[in-house]
Image (cartoon, rainbow, N blue to C red):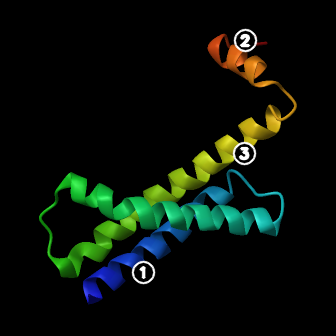
């Protein structure tokens, strides 16, 4: 039971650190958005860190599990924040478009011209 609690605490800390590390690259607009994205980072870490660790199949002692959990949780928090920002920007950009227009744009993206 203590190993499980320790793993969840390290997942929480890793998710927070992963979310905080990307804050300097993608700053939130206000504190509400910062807390929302922090929650998403922690949620990703809590949900996905242990299944990823189990799928890797490392033979580790339960006393060392927190170190691996912390690292995987950091990555999950970082990716969770990035995905949240990516989806939010996509929805904000396309909020006034019809679903068919968005589908056509995704199917045939316009090439950006370099200057």
**Residue 53 at x, y percent in the picture:** 27, 60
Q: Which residue is mark 3?
A: 88
Q: Which residue is mark 2?
A: 110
- As displayed, is residue 79 above or below residue 23? above
**Residue 5 at x, y percent in the picture:** 35, 84
For the residue labelled by badge 1, is the local secondary structure a helix, a strand or a loop? helix
- Tell me the quadrant of the picture where the C terminus can be found: top right
- Tell me the quadrant of the picture where the N terminus can be found: bottom left
Q: Earlier in the sequence, mark 3 or mark 1?
A: 1
Q: Which residue is mark 1?
A: 9
Circle number at residue 99: none
Q: CA distance from mark 3 to mark 2?
A: 21 Å
Q: Determine which quarter of the picture holds residue 80.
A: bottom right
**Residue 67 at x, y percent in the picture:** 31, 72
- The single residue placed furthest to the right in the displayed view is 96
Q: How many numbered circles are shown? A: 3
Q: CA distance from mark 1 to mark 2?
A: 45 Å
């Amino acid at each position: 039971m203590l190993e499980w609690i320790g793993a969840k605490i390290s997942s929480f800390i890793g998710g927070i650190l992963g979310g905080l590390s990307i804050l300097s690259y993608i700053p939130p607009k206000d504190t509400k958005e910062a807390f929302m994205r922090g929650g998403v980072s922690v949620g990703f870490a809590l949900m996905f860190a242990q299944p990823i660790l189990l799928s890797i199949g490392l033979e580790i002692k339960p006393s060392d599990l927190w170190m691996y959990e912390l690292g995987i949780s950091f990555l999950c928090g970082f990716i969770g924040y990035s995905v949240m920002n990516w989806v939010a920007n996509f929805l904000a950009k396309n909020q006034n478009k019809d679903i068919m227009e968005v589908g056509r744009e995704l199917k045939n993206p316009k090439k950006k011209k370099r200057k």
